[in-house]
Image (cartoon, rainbow, N blue to C red):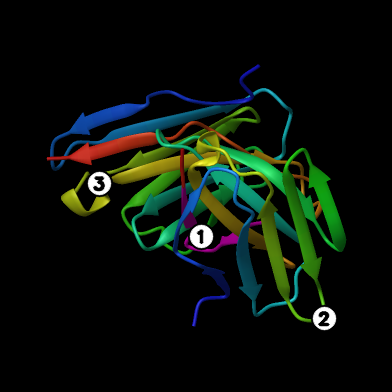
Amino acid sequence: DVKVTQSSRYLVKRTGEKVFLECVQDMDHENMFWYRQDPGLGLRLIYFSYDVKMKEKGDIPEGYSVSREKKERFSLILESASTNQTSMYLCASSFRDRGLYEAFFGQGTRLTVV
Amino acid sequence: KNEVEQSPQNLTAQEGEFITINCSYSVGISALHWLQQHPGGGIVSLFMLSSGKKKHGRLIATINIQEKHSSLHITASHPRDSAVYICAVRGAARQLTFGSGTQLTVLP
C-alpha cells in the first residue's frame, strides 16, 4: 500500500539539463515537502507546499523550483542541472500543521548529474 | 551548532544486544519523530511523540521535554535492524528539522 510515490528511483542527467522530479501522494495531505540528503549533512529542506499553488522556500532553494497544481502532486524542478545537485531527493507529505501527525516519505530518487 | 544532534554517528552491535541511540535538540518542539532508512533510500516513520514513552515490538522511544532529549532503544537487536535511524523535530513551523542520522549495523 504505497502512499507517497516518486516517479523515479534512479536518474542520470547531463549538466545544464532541465530535470523534473515528481511526487504523488494518495492520503489527501495538505503539506508536501522536498528534501535532499547528502552524506554528513542529513536531510535538508528545499521547498514545501501547504496547499495547492502555494509554495515556500526551505533552507536550500537555490537552483530549484517547484510546482503544485493539484493537491496530490508536488514537482521539483532543477532549472539547469549542475554536478553539485547530485544527491538523494526525498519527497514527504503530512496533514496541515498538526504537530502529532506523522510524515510519510517516498522511496527517494537518486539523481546523478554528469 | 545544529538544532538536532544525534549520537552516536555509527554503531556496530552483535545480534541480541540492547541498543540505544540518543537525540538532543535545542529548540522548543511540538513533536519528535524517529525515522528508519534502509539501504535504497526509503524512509519509514517509527515513532512520533511529544511526551513520555512509546513502544512498538522491540522498539522503545522516550522523550524528556525538560531536558530536550530523546532516546530510541532496540531490544534483542537483529541484523534486519541494520539501517540509518534519524531523529527529527517539529517546532512551530510546519517542517521537520533532522539530525544527521545514526548508522546502525547489527552483526549476526
State the residue at coordinates (47%, 41%): A90
The residue indicated by pointer 3 is A86
How far from the left and from the top, in percent, is residue A33?
Answer: 56, 45
With A95 as the anchor, is A18 left or right in this view?
A: left
Q: Main secondary structure of the magenta part?
A: strand
- For badge 3, the amino acid type reads Thr
Return the x and y of residue A19 as percentages of the image width and height: 29, 34
Where in the figure is residue A107, as x and y percent of width and height? Answer: 48, 31
Q: Is residue A43 visible?
A: yes
Gap in Å between the C-alphas at discs 2 and 3?
39 Å
Residue type of the residue flagged with mark 1: Gly
Asked if both marks, 2 and 1, belong to the same chain, the answer given is no
Q: Is residue B97 magenta?
A: yes
Mark 1 surroundings within 10 Å by alpha-carbon count, few (fewer than 14), some (14 through 19), many (20 or more): some
Q: Quadrant of the C terminus of chain A?
A: top left
Q: Residue at x 66, y 52 (%)?
A: B34
The boundaries of the magenta stretch are B95-105
Relative to residue B60, is residue A81 drawn left or right? left
